[in-house]
Image (cartoon, rainbow, N blue to C red):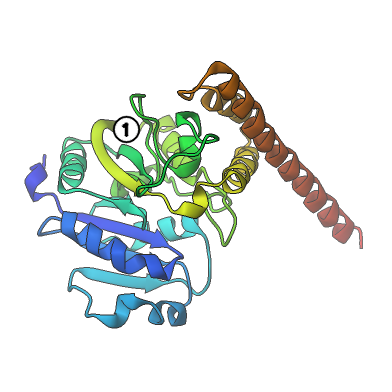
Amino acid sequence: MTSSADLPLTIAICGNRPDNLPGAIARTTAAMGPRDRLLIIADMPAQHLLASPTTASPLLPRVRVLCNEGNKGLAYSRNKAMKEATTRHLVFIDDDIVPTVEAVTRIREALAAGAHVTGTRITAHLQGRRSPWFLTSGQLHYLGSHAPARPVSIWGGSFAIDVEHTRLLEVGFNERLGRIGSSLTSAEDTTFVREMTARGATATILHDAEVQHLIPAHRLTLSYLLRRAFWQGRSEARRNDARRGISKEWNRNRSGAAPRRVRLALAVLYTASVLLGVCREAITRSQTAADAETRGDR
């Protein structure tokens, strides 16, 4: 078995926000080991990337940047990173995550020990802003962050895979899920992990290894959080898990550290938005099927 200190990693940043890339590259390269490589999958045409500050200074030799022809979505970019990785082990880090040497080391150790999938704890960094009354720890998952003092699961902001084992199991990221354009579709990461473990992959959760998720001001608004809950419902429907997804969201939303009446009100508010998303996806699916049937009758 490979020594963890000698295990090279490809660290992939998949994103469609060119302004985020310079900071993401600086933060990630600071946490990399000497044999690691950084792979940028820019989900945008190359001309958009050229306008970004990323190209204002020479890229490090260990950084490779690939552009999609257009906005193909996060799942598409993750699948592309698996194809382009030059090492057996691939780490996904979002462009608004602050990785640390310790977290990358713990990921490296878990992979060297035989884990096929592993992930860290992700904590919300509000960047000096106060948490609004409508955001408790029960809604932190809408910000891609784990609730403090609770067990974590493997999420896409900071996780790693054994690419060879993934190919052996023939598992990829569902391209109907994950961020696409301005939508807030999600669950491509948890669906991937679920499929991997269902086929016998070993998953290791690093509960005490932590990275920070930088939360911008516009996400600390009720309109954003309700929209995110709406798209959570659409995502659950897309992966045919609506009933369990609604129950899961209800339990999450009433679990926050707030007075019982507040928690209950927030649970009703956010879960109603999830339910609306489920209904919207069902209507869209029905309309698509009807349109296909109409075209077939012509």
Dot 1 falls on a residue whose secondary structure is strand
Q: In this view, does 31 lie to the left or right of 85?
A: left
Q: Please tell me in which quadrant of the rendered image residue 119 appears.
A: top left
Picture coordinates of residue 55, whole percent (x, y): 31, 80
- Horizontal and vertical percent position of residue 193: 41, 38
Report the residue marked by disc 1.
203
Which quadrant holds the N terminus? top left
Q: Tag count in the figure? A: 1
Q: What residue type is labelled 1?
A: Ala
Question: Which one is nearer the viewer's eye here, 105 or 144?
Answer: 144
Image quadrant in which the C terminus is located = bottom right
The 10 Å Cα crowd at callout 1, few under 14, some 14 to 19, many 20 or more, is many
**In the visual, does 49 lie left or right of 36?**
right
Q: Specify whether 8 is left or right of 184.
A: left
Using the image, determine if residue 172 lies above or below residue 258. below
Task: Reply above or below: 134 against 160.
Answer: above
Residue at the spot x=31%, y=45% of the render?
212
Quadrant in the rendering for residue 238: top right
Image spot of residue 79 (x, y percent):
42, 56
Q: Where is residue 68 in the image (x, y as percent from the top left)?
A: 46, 71
